[in-house]
Image (cartoon, grey):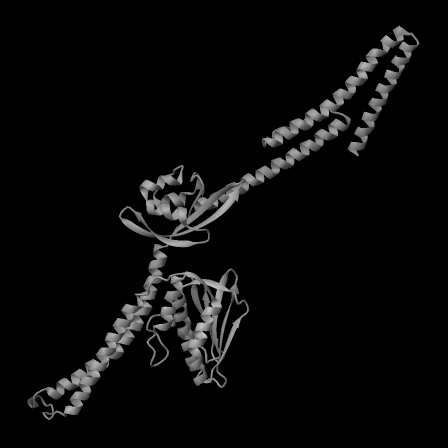
Amino acid sequence: MILSKKRIGVIAEILFLLLVTALIVACFIQQHWWWGIAGLPFWIYAIARIINSTEKTDKIVLEFVEAIKYNDYSKNYNTAQATGDIKKLLIGLNSITDRFKTINKERKAESIYLQTILETVGIGIISFDDNTGAIDWMNESFKKITDIPYFRNIGALEKRNPAFLDLLLTLEPGQSQVFNFRKGLLDEKLLITATFFTTNGKTDKLVSLQNVEETLDETESIAWQKLLNVMTHEIMNSVAPISSLADTLKKQLEPAENGANPHIDPDDLRLGLETIKKRSEGLQRFAITYRNLNKITKPVLKKVLVSEIFDNLQNLMQPTLDQKNIELDVILKDPFLSIQADTSLVEQVLINLMTNAIEAVKSSSHPRIVLSALIDGEKACVKVADNGMGIPASIAEQIFIPFFSTRKNGNGIGLSLCKQIMLLHKGNIQMKSKEGEGTVFLLHF
């Protein structure tokens, strides 16, 4: 509607100019010089009207655009003296300015709100230019946790803590790492995580760090309690009979005046000493096993096809499976699925899981083991499933503890070893089980 009225006004002014021009030209042709000269002011007035109307609108629009360009929302046009289309234009521009003011206030309020949250959380946060190292922002928690005041460039950490600086620069997006941070005379464990984000063509690195000393200490304490309970149980199982048997033999060897039988049966003595020897050797093997559990070599990671690992495992385990009449199903929908892994260590994990599965299905009427692999989210997942009796929920949390075993002849090392190997691969191992239906072990790489 505004454009239509504006167009009509411009057309009217042009027609008026043409009319005045035609009359002046006609007067000069008819040699009515004074009438022609008298018409010139009207002709000038018509041109001035058109120029003024166009320039006024352009000036208002250009002023408005310039103000918006520099985020200046203070301009408010006076509409009291304006008329017609100009007044409507000014009212419209004022409405747009008011809307920008509202949006700007909301953005500032949101920014203050978020910054207040980031300043009050107990997690240290720092953002810096990934190319120049210039600090964009850091919160108070970062300064408090690191005991480092504000600095302008991440490179300033070189003199204070070069190892910390190296980790901040090299930590890949999505990765987390625990770092021992020296603070005065104390070492604190910091969990450090990094991510990248791009704004206005500039790539920034956002690093968060959290003091996890107390959490790790508590977790470590619980783990030690579980381990010591199992180790105490294993040691007492050997020490108690050794102590009892040694006491019995001691009494048999005591002089007759102490009330003991002076007639010693050599066979009983030999049997007792042999039993003590066996239990002592068992304790020695227990100690050696524990020592070896902590000597797993660092994995040599390389890209390997899951199908190759499955083929090697099947060739190794098939004779045992055939002997025990156990059905093995291998499911691999993507024959080119690969993982970054140490082949020998991963095969060791799968052999342990397959051995456990073979033991689990021995009482099943139709024993079956399924070996499969797929992509779960962004990670490769290898599964070993069986249709055995399952693992009771009461002991499910203990199966990865060293030396814990549900089998009489088990040493409780297998699953603990599997977990350590998966941790070395930056992956994890999980177990899902339902009594009477079976168990599934999942390896995420």
Q: Is residue 402 left or right of residue 91?
A: left
Q: Is residue 171 above or below residue 264?
A: above
Q: Residue furthest top?
A: 34
- Number of labelled discs? 0
Residue 124 image point, x, y percent: 41, 47
Q: Can you say whether 41 is above or below 64 in the image?
A: above
Quadrant location, the N terminus: top right
- Using the image as rendered, state which of residue 148 and residue 363 is in the foreground: 363
Closest to the observer, 109 or 331: 331
Q: Residue at x 39, y 45 (%)?
A: 142
Q: Quadrant of residue 101?
A: top right
Percent x, y for residue 413?
34, 72
Image quarter of the C terminus: bottom left
Task: Answer whether residue 360 is visible to the viewer in this image.
Answer: no
Residue 6 shown left or right of residue 417 in the figure? right
Q: Position of residue 338 (x, y in %)?
A: 48, 63
Q: Look at the picture and state if 269 lies above or below 221.
A: below
For the question of whether residue 329 can be seen, the reply is yes
Q: Quadrant of residue 219?
A: bottom left
- Left or right of 55 on screen, residue 326: left
Residue 247 image offset from top left, x and y in percent? 16, 83
Work out whether 72 lies above or below 232: above
